Amino acid sequence: MQYSLLATVVCATIALPAMAADVTYRNDIAPLFKAQCADCHSSEAKAPTLQEYKLDQKKYDKEKVGPRTDTYENLVMLIAYPDSGALMRRLDDGTGKFAGGKPGNMYKNLGSTDAERVKNLATVKAWLGEGAWNLNRWNQKGDVPGITKEEQAKLILKY
């Protein structure tokens, strides 16, 4: 099983640059998030917008409900601003800088198998843009620096 996971990771990494130009929100990301995230992070699931979540974060955290990921705009807010890197921190497989080897709390929801999670993560990374995957927040927190203009400039996020 370890060998097949390694082979999948290697193939996904090699295919990533070629895939990046073709990945769009409409064709790839929206269907992926609908399939993997909508049960908890859509308007039908009564998930809050990011603004609603920020206003009463303790309530939503207690209910184990996170912000919506059901529109392009909602995802951009969790990637670029105002909650820079939030999506990446949640979906990281543990290999991201500052992850400390620990996968994000939503990584497990990217698929039902290791191979599916690796494939879906590669799709999200390709959509973001080459080198755009980072776990930085808008402002520094602890040892994690704030996102830089150079890091933000790498974001592609094709609609």
Image: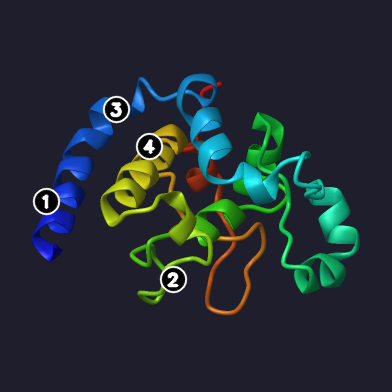
Residue count near mark 3 (Cα–Cα under 10 Å), binned few <14, some 14–19, many ≥20: some
Residue 64, x across and y down, in percent: 72, 67
- Numbered mark located on residue 98 in the image: 2
Residue count near mark 1 (Cα–Cα under 10 Å), binned few <14, some 14–19, many ≥20: few
Q: Which residue is mark 3?
A: 19
For discs 4 and 2, the disc positioned in front in the rendered view: 4
Do the numbered discs 3 and 4 sit on residues whose CB atoms are within 8 Å?
Answer: yes
Secondary element at image label 4: helix
Residue 148, x across and y down, in percent: 55, 52
* Amino acid residing under circle 3: Met
Residue count near mark 4 (Cα–Cα under 10 Å), binned few <14, some 14–19, many ≥20: many
* Amino acid residing under circle 2: Phe
Given the current orientation, which residue lies at the most extreme right position? 55
For discs 1 and 2, the disc positioned in front in the rendered view: 1
- Numbered mark located on residue 7 in the image: 1
Lower position in the chain sequence, tag 4 or tag 2: 2
Lower position in the chain sequence, tag 2 or tag 3: 3
Give the Cα distance between marks 3 and 1.
17 Å
Do the numbered discs 1 and 2 sit on residues whose CB atoms are within 8 Å?
Answer: no
* Amino acid residing under circle 4: Thr
Split into 4 quadrants, where in the image is the N terminus? bottom left
Total marks shown come to 4
Give the Cα distance between marks 1 and 2.
25 Å
Split into 4 quadrants, where in the image is the C terminus? top right
Q: Is residue 128 above or below residue 92?
A: above
Residue count near mark 2 (Cα–Cα under 10 Å), binned few <14, some 14–19, many ≥20: some
Lower position in the chain sequence, tag 1 or tag 2: 1
Q: Is residue 97 above or below residue 109?
A: below
Lower position in the chain sequence, tag 3 or tag 4: 3
